[in-house]
Structures are given as C-alpha cells and as structure tokens.
Image (tube, rainbow, N blue to C red):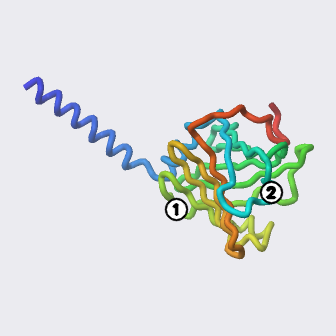
C-alpha cells in the first residue's frame, strides 16, 4: 500500500509538472530562455556571407545587461562601436523586438527604435518579428524586413531578412562560454 501511495504521488507530481509546462505559452518559454542569461556576455560571429562591412575584422559581443519589468536589453557591441541595443519587451501574447541606436554622446540616432512584434506566441526556441508600422514610417524600404531570434542551450542567433535583398544577415553567439562584459553602451549610465 505504501509503495502504491508513493507511486501515485510521484505520478501526480510528474503529471502536474508536465501540464504546467504544456500550459506555459511558447513566447513565455522563449522569454525564460532569454532571462537565464541575464548579466552574462557572449562572443559571436557572422555566419552569412558577405559579412557586412562594419562587422568585418571586429569582435562581436552581446551582453544581457538589463532584465526586469517585462523588458530585456541586450547591447550588441561591434568592435569599439557600442551604439546598438536589442530591446525585447514581453506582451500578453507576444514579444516585441526594437533596435535602440545611439550616438557616442548618448543621443538617439535618427534611425532608432525600429523592429516589430511577433504576430503570435511563436515557438519556444524561435520568435519572428516582422517590421511594424513605426519601422515603415521611419524606414519605408524596410516594410518587408523580418527579424528572427532563436535560442538553444548552446546558441543565440540574430537574423535579418530583407525581402528586397538576397543577402540575409545571421549572427550566432556561443552560449556555452561567457566572455568579459563590454563597457556600457552609449547613452547608458554604468
């Protein structure tokens, strides 16, 4: 009887855990995967060819610098250029990706805060972000842009496909090995 009771408790616990995991939406699972890296920095490399000119011969580092209150900010440092930050915002049924670009003095670039919101809950390891209206108003030729981000236990990939171009961009970061965090991005206080 004791063994049967223990087996029942174990089965109930496993079933409850499985149901809880199944009930958690894909976008929330994706979000939790991002949150696991808060405070950490990782090196990356451009996987696609040709390598964008401003990325050539440069160290690429992403830093999960700020996590909280439904927003994760990840500066993307290219060599000495600390102008780029990816901003992920958690919504009820989706995630938004915006690109915050700053000048060295911290002021916003003319082309900043572009991106999009996932049209649905997506996948637990992959989210798509088609260009939103704010992006189209800011950069009309970017109306067909689609960004997507994937995350596994070992890699984070940032991707951009411009419908008007046959040259996609993919940057892959190795999540198995932390690197030294870069200096704060332009416009941020330490």
Q: Residue at x 92, y 43 (%)?
A: 105
Query: Which of the numbered marks, if any, corresponds to residue 162?
Result: none
Residue 73 visible, this orientation: no
Residue 127 as seen in the image, left or right of residue 104: left
* Residue denoted by label 2: 112
Residue 76 visible, this orientation: yes
Instruction: Say whether marks 1 and 2 touch (CB < 8 Å).
Output: no
| Spot occupied by residue 63 in the image (x, y as percentages of width and height) | 69, 39
Q: Secondary structure at mark 1?
A: loop
Residue 56 sits above or below residue 77 on the image: below
Q: Residue at x 17, y 27 (%)?
A: 6
| Spot occupied by residue 153 in the image (x, y as percentages of width and height) | 50, 42
Residue located farthest toward the bottom when viewing the structure as drawn: 164
* Residue denoted by label 1: 120
The quadrant of the image that shows the C terminus is top right
Q: Earlier in the sequence, mark 1 or mark 2?
A: 2
Q: Secondary structure at mark 2?
A: loop
| Spot occupied by residue 56 in the image (x, y as percentages of width and height) | 79, 54
The quadrant of the image that shows the N terminus is top left
Q: Residue at x 55, y 37 (%)?
A: 36
């Amino acid at each position: 009887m004791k063994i049967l009771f223990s087996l029942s408790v174990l089965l109930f616990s496993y079933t409850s855990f499985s149901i809880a995991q199944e009930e958690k939406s894909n976008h929330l699972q994706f979000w939790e995967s991002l949150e696991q890296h808060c405070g950490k920095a990782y090196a990356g490399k451009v996987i696609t060819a040709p390598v964008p000119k401003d990325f050539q011969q440069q160290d690429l580092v992403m830093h999960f610098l700020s996590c909280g209150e439904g927003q994760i900010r990840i500066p993307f440092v290219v060599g000495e250029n600390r102008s780029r930050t990816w901003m992920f915002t958690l919504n009820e049924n989706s995630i938004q990706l915006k690109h915050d670009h700053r000048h060295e003095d911290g002021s916003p670039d003319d082309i900043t805060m572009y991106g999009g919101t996932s049209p649905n809950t997506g996948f637990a390891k992959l989210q798509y972000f088609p260009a939103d209206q704010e992006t189209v108003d800011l950069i009309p030729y970017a109306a067909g842009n689609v960004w997507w981000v994937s995350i596994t236990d070992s890699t984070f990939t940032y991707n951009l496909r411009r419908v008007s171009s046959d040259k996609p961009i993919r940057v892959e970061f190795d999540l198995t090995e932390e690197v030294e965090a870069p200096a704060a991005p332009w416009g941020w206080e330490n």
